[in-house]
Amino acid sequence: MRLKDKVVVITGASSGIGRALAVKAFDQGCRVVLAARNQEAMEEVVKGWPPGRCLVVRTDVSNPEDCEHLIDKTVESFGGVDVLINNAGISMRALFADVRLEVIEDLMRINFWGSVYCSKYALPWLLKSGGSLVGVSSIAGYKGLPARTGYSASKFALQGFLESVRVENLRKGLHVLIACPGFTASNIRKTALSKDGSTQGESPRKEEKMMSAERVAHHIIKAITKRKRTLVLTRQGKLTVFLNKLFPGLTDKLVYSHMAKEPDSPFT
């Protein structure tokens, strides 16, 4: 699949992986639609881009009306949708015993329902173009991570949803990609929700040692062009998925030990 001149919609495009995806898609010659809540940050991304190659739509993906508006504006401006990348998401860091239920509900509304809403409104256009439906999931969609119950639940749900959509449209030319980055240097941990719903603030992990958002975007765009089914990134991520298939009990212990070593870990 060649991406030049394709219409690519990216949610969560104001920062992190979403921002990097927007830049990468633009460099590939795409017409890029950026969607996020932070209008100012998106305007900064597209500064200097020709108006005929980009569109910024303020979107809260937890609101179905916003998602419908996003797709309507895209079709109005560019005539259709070739690629939808459901990237918007938030994380959390709190034990299930301590977390407020509203925190998990917020994660599901954004990480899962946001993808469902956008996919629902984009699907007719993706089927028409034989395009790509992409979900940016996580290794947490393969292995439940401690202190990330809501996050893992949302990613497991996202992957099940996308797999079902793929099978339903098996003979209709729709490409579905489930992309699962490992730990990535982005602001998702800084904006992660704590047990009471407040933002975490500083990241508990060494961001400089992680895969960059730009590198993740490179791999995702490449996987779209090759119409891959799944993409699992980083050696640690691939190893976790592999070990969990063969030795789930051992993987439980390894994951617990790894996450418990974080500064200010909720396990201590």
Image: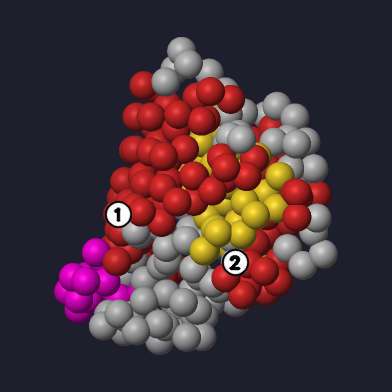
Task: Specify whether residue 202 is painted magenta.
Answer: no
Q: Which mark is residue 195?
A: none
Give the color scheme: rainbow, by chain, secondary structure or one colour. Answer: secondary structure
Q: Nearer the viewer, residue 216 or 107?
A: 107
Q: In which quadrant of the rendered view does residue 124 lie?
A: top left
In this rendering, position of residue 138 left or right of residue 94:
right
Q: Residue 253 at x, y = what percent?
A: 34, 60
Q: Which residue is mark 1?
A: 153
- Residue 160 in view (yes/no): yes
**Sooner in the amino-acid sequence: mark 2 or mark 1:** 2
- Pick the quarter of the image with the N terminus: top right
In this rendering, position of residue 32 left or right of residue 96:
right
Q: Which residue is mark 2?
A: 14
Residue at the spot x=42%, y=83% of the render?
200
- Residue 233 in view (yes/no): no
Residue at the spot x=54%, y=72% of the render?
38
Residue segment shown in magenta: 93-105
Q: Nearer the viewer, residue 34 or 157?
A: 34
Q: Contact, CB < 8 Å: mark 2 with mark 1?
A: no
Q: Nearer the viewer, residue 82 or 86?
A: 82
Mark 1 packing: few (<14 Cα in 10 Å), some, or many (20+)?
Answer: many
Residue at the spot x=78%, y=36% of the render?
4
Mark 2 packing: few (<14 Cα in 10 Å), some, or many (20+)?
Answer: many
Q: Amino acid at mark 2?
A: Ser
